[in-house]
Amino acid sequence: VLCSVPTHCQKKNESEGVIFLEEYDIRAKELQNRAVIAGWNYQTNLTEENAKKQVELNLEVAKFSKDVATDASEYDWENFSNFTVKRLFSMITTLGTAALEDEEKLEEYNNLLSEMEEIYSTGQACEYDDPETCLDLNPDLEDCMADSTDYNRLLFCWEGWRDAAGRRLADPYTKFVELSNEAVRADGWNDTGEYWRSWYETADFQQQLENIYQELQPLYQNLHAYVRRKLIDTYGAEMVNAEGPIPAHLLGNMWAQTWGNIYNLVIPFPNKPSIDVTDEMVRQGYDARRMFNLSDEFFREMGQIPMPDSFWERTMYTRPDDREVVCHASAWDFYLDNDVRIKMCTKVNQEDLVTVHHEMGHIEYFLQYAHQPLPFREGANPGFHEAVGDLLALSVSTPAHLNKVGLLPELVDDPEVDINFLMQMALEKIAFLPFGYLIDQWRWRVFNGDITPDKYNEEWWKLRTQYQGIVPPVPRNPDKDFDAGSKYHVPANTPYIRYFVSFVIQFQFHEAMCSLSGFSGELHKCDASAGAMKEIAGSRLAEMLRMGKSQPWPEAFEVLTGSRAMSAAAILQYFAPLIDWLEKQNENETLGWDNGWTPPYDCEGTGGFTCLDGSRCVRPADKCDGI
Ligand SMILES: C[C@H](N[C@H](C(=O)O)[C@@H]1CCCN1C(=O)[C@@H](N)CC(=O)O)C(=O)N1CCC[C@H]1C(=O)O
Ligand SMILES: [Zn+2]
């Protein structure tokens, strides 16, 4: 019944709709599989030819999405009775960025994405006094930020990366924002941010997030004040101000998003044992593959699905030395034949062991919902997908579990050792919260036009200082710098609020898994795999994951946690002993950082300054441009 004037003809009925969905699923999976393969081939071999093939496939997917949405609108689906059939039709007729009509613009949109991915993944910072020696982000610059405690060496790595990637992404990103908004507007959205937030199916989503952030902010301020005091001990009071924001390059990470790498500068009880998995792994000769095996074993122990053989054959474990790749770790669902893979330039250290669990959590979710119709093969909301791996890593990271797997020589039951452990966890989980929250606060305002391109960097730093209490170590050049571009997810166009949601709900999941497994005691001591009823916990987790996106997320949330709402209570309960300890530590500290302090910046005519180790840090005068 193909009719030219839909309002005057009989729309197709529900039983015809079910047949339509069956045919759709077969065609959609086949096409998605080819598109993901093209994406994999590009990211694991950044050639012009592979970029073109990836763009071609993305265009084919967009065309298919448009055609199938048109076909779907011939069915009277809004009036169908079956919830699942209606939900599937609703998802299939939601196009998002695929709605862009103009072929040329859609091609430009996809070319920009490939180009930005390439710029980010191949960016290098070259030594001031030896332009031939250039450092990659992974591993060189990341290792620099993690290991150096030389103020000016850190400054070289921090600024060098932003010159190499951030600055070069300003123009393509500005163009990209326009095209992305034009695309989603063709699908009826006001802007890209509104389309992204719709995936949470939560009317007051932004308000809920703000409430949770306000509940967590005091804990973050206490951690910030404590760490700031310790950094003054390391770098001196003229480089770190006791009541001001912290220079952004001193937190052990290129983006100051997690602070685990400066644990050795902030240990609460230095003369008591701490966990140092990195040393233990290196001592035991761990390689990437063994780190993956450790994670897979834990998923099995928790009754989840083991990694299929093809995973072990096709995963990229380490950075290849014969081609350019996207090193930023990611998990891939190929939608056919249980083909799931991780792509990672793994380093043998604790940080990457956590990332391996994070990526494997995505893989686990892919496997658990593989039986669902294609549109339901997503997280219940994107935060769920980010939480799975971290959730299991909360159990793996406990001293008890690390001792069990031979990565922690001795187990000590001592409240001061507990504080050392909770500090390590806070440097990962509490430090991250403002970062996880602010990225999309910035991006949503870029997409809705509140932040115009000339203000991209100024507003970025306003948010970075307001939420994280950090400040750029060198003045930013308003015409050239685009520091948001130095963070993978911005040029890669991956939304970020999902990580803030994950860092909240993973503790609610952990609390649920621990009580279901029969664990009793302080939450931070729980290793769910040690619970007498761990099978119950594992099967409840699997039951939630199997649902994919077949129901609004509170339904899935309730299966595991028994509740239907995000809450900061679980993470605050987990860190309760540390909160008390920090408040005592900070009795004489000023919480907060709004005294407007900025770091001293040595930029005399010589353009040179002296490193802490007394060596002469040659610095080309142009590094003082615009200052
Ligand atoms: C290291 C991790 N890489 C992402 C992730 O695993 O989420 C990659 C890149 C972007 C999306 N992605 C995927 O793998 C998706 N295909 C997963 C999915 O299918 O949804 C990452 O970026 N993380 C981890 C913690 C904080 C954040 C960061 O490092 O800032
Ligand atoms: Zn993730």
Image (cartoon, rainbow, N blue to C red):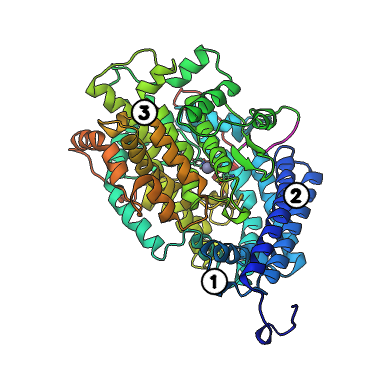
Amino acid type shown at disc 3: Asp
Q: Which residue is mark 2?
A: 54
Q: Secondary structure at mark 1?
A: loop
- The one nearer the camera, 53 or 224, is 53
Q: Nearer the viewer, mark 3 or mark 1?
A: 3
Q: Is residue 610 visible?
A: no
Q: Is mark 1 within 8 Å of ligand 1?
A: no
In this picture, is 453 found above or below 540? Answer: below
Neighbours of disc 1 within 10 Å: few (<14), some (14-19), many (20+): some
Residue 527: image tag: 3
Q: Residue at x 69, y 40 (%)?
A: 337
Please report the bounds of the magenta region as a residue range.
Answer: 323-327
Given residues 309 and 413, the one toward you in this image is: 309
> Amino acid under label 1?
Asn
- Residue 532: where, in percent of width, then height? 34, 27
Residue with the mark numbered 1: 190
User: How many marks on residues?
Assistant: 3
Q: Amino acid at mark 2?
A: Gln
Q: Earlier in the sequence, mark 2 or mark 1?
A: 2
Label whose residue precedes the other's in the sequence (3 or 2): 2
Above or below, comparing residue 261 to residue 461 in the picture? above
Q: Quadrant of residue 441?
A: bottom left
Cα distance between the residues tagged 3 and 1: 45 Å
147, 194: nearer the viewer: 194
